Amino acid sequence: MRGRIKKEQGLAVAVSGGKDSAVLLHTLTKLRKKFPINLLAISIDEGTHYRAQLIECAKELCEMLEVKHVVLSFKGIIGKNLDELVNENIKACTVCAIVRRRLLDLVATLTNSKLAVGHNLDDIAQGVLMNLLRNEPQRLKRMFFPIIKPKMPGRLRPLMWIDERATLTYAFLHELPFMHKKCPYSHRNVIRTQARELLQQMSLTLPSAKIGLVKSALTLAKHLPLTYEEKRCEKCGHWTSGEICKVCEIIETFGLEKAEMWEEKIKDRLGI
Ligand code: SF4
């Protein structure tokens, strides 16, 4: 882990208020005693009513672990909350993931940090299964071997080999403040829900199913040729595989402020 963070870099940790990111932050603070790392916790508030309680858990956790915590809300940075960004053509999870990823990347870039996220083995196995079923092998490649892009923070997933039950047990044993609540939009992500159920079912008869799937995908991805390229978005200059990035598409669709303004507001929130 230390080898993946340059000496002068910090580590921005996405903290949702759920168990996985609580475990991630807790283990990182333990590591901090051995290898000094400058930690910054970031919570993104999409504006759904369930997130407010999760943010309270995230605040309590950061106070307990003495980690600086920054909360960025969709409303405060991009001008609308998630409920206002959903229409018949765009699913909540799609827009939520795109905007949240950009906000996290911006914080990490602006603070010269790598970004650590709490994705566990179950999350990764579901993603792998979905990409295979959709016949999207390049997404697998991107998942495990992303192109290193200048001025992009780079993402670490330290819990990717840890299964959900283990993170839950750890969180309980260490009495970490977290909330096990489902986002009101999660049931609309039918494919992920079915992938989760299928993998749970498989694991009953083959306990190594999830780890086996992820390891196989990793081997496949290693040997896949890279057939996509990343270029600069014509509008905001961010990295994208198309002409215009997904964030700028969302900005156009919903008439939001330009992405440069998001950066200014985040700088303001970070006091830099
Ligand atoms: Fe966002 Fe979908 Fe996750 Fe809810 S379930 S937080 S809408 S990605």
Image (cartoon, rainbow, N blue to C red):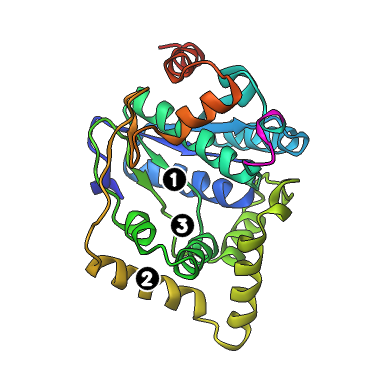
Q: Which mark is residue 199?
A: none
223 in relation to 174, above or below: below
Query: Within the magenta stretch, is there residue 6?
Result: no
Q: Residue at x 51, y 38 (%)?
A: 98
Please report whichever mark, 1 or 3, sits nearer to the chain's N-terminal start: 1
Q: Position of residue 178 (x, y in %)?
A: 68, 46
For the magenta stretch, what is the residue range?
A: 84-89
Give the Cα distance between marks 2 and 1: 27 Å
Identify the mark nearer the N-term, 3 or 2: 3
* Tag 3 and tag 2, C-beta contact below 8 Å: no
For marks 2 and 1, the one nearer the N-term is 1
Secondary structure of the residue carrying tag 3 is: loop
Residue corresponding to mark 2 = 217
Q: Mark 2 or mark 1, which is nearer to you?
A: 2
Give the main secondary structure of the magenta stretch.
Answer: loop
Q: Which residue is drawn at 58% across and 46% down?
A: 22
Queried on whether the Cβ of the residue with tag 1 lies below 8 angstroms from ligand 1, the answer reads no
Q: Is mark 1 on a helix, strand or loop?
A: helix
85 within the magenta span: yes
Q: Residue at x 57, y 60 (%)?
A: 167
Residue at numbered disc 1? 28
Tell whether 141 sits left or right of 179: left
Separation (CA) of disc 3 from disc 2: 17 Å
Judged from this view, the residue extending furthest toward the bottom is 205
Instruction: Identify the residue position indicated by label 3 in the image.
Output: 159
User: Which residue is drawn at the image coordinates 49% and 70% (left, top)?
Assistant: 133
Q: Is mark 3 within 8 Å of ligand 1?
A: no
**Mark 2: secondary structure:** helix
Q: Is residue 111 visible?
A: no
